[in-house]
Image (cartoon, rainbow, N blue to C red):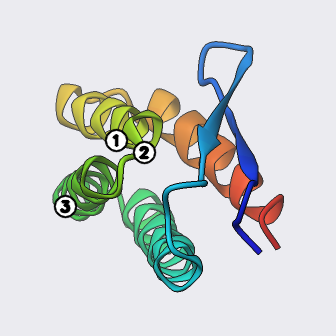
Amino acid sequence: MWNGLRILSPDWRGGQFSLDADEVDDELAQVFVEELRRLTGELQDGLSQKNTEMIRVAAHSIKGMGGTLGFPEISVVGQEIEIKAMAGFPDEVQSLVEALSRWLTTLE
């Protein structure tokens, strides 16, 4: 599934960039996507509950997971969400979470 695949990921500023999954084992990549889906659900729950701490924790996990697995673009998205949540910009957080959710549907 992942060998030789370049995963297109949204650039949160309008364009696109790709994640090179050549170096990621198929099983690890699948776990990454499943965990990213779970964490995105937590972000959505945090938004609906207006729970900044829930959003911050999920975004922080996304940031770390992206960095650990060599997907710095995902790490940046997590960091952006975390910063926007802590700064009190719920509309921007909502927009980033929606973009992440849309992107995840392209991986099905």
Which quarter of the rendering shows the N terminus?
bottom right
Write down the quadrant of residue 4 in the picture: bottom right
Q: Which residue is mark 1?
A: 75
Q: Looking at the picture, how far across and down is residue 8, in whole percent?
A: 74, 40
* Residue visible at 48% across and 68% down in the picture: 36
Density class for disc 2 (Cα within 10 Å; few <14, some 14-19, many ≥20) is: some
Disc 1 residue type (three-letter): Ser
Density class for disc 1 (Cα within 10 Å; few <14, some 14-19, many ≥20) is: many
Density class for disc 3 (Cα within 10 Å; few <14, some 14-19, many ≥20) is: some
Q: Which residue is mark 2?
A: 71
**Image mark for residue 92:** none
Inter-mark Cα distance, 1 to 3: 13 Å
Position of residue 41 in the picture relative to residue 75 (left or right): right
Which is nearer the N-term, disc 1 or disc 3?
3
Q: Which residue is mark 3?
A: 57
The answer to whether the residue labelled 1 contacts the one labelled 3, judged by CB atoms less than 8 Å apart, is: no
In the rendered view, would you say 73 is above or below 105?
A: above
Inter-mark Cα distance, 1 to 2: 7 Å
Q: Nearer the viewer, mark 1 or mark 2?
A: 2
Q: Looking at the picture, how far across and down is residue 53, in whole percent?
A: 16, 58
Disc 2 residue type (three-letter): Phe
Which is nearer the N-term, disc 3 or disc 2?
3
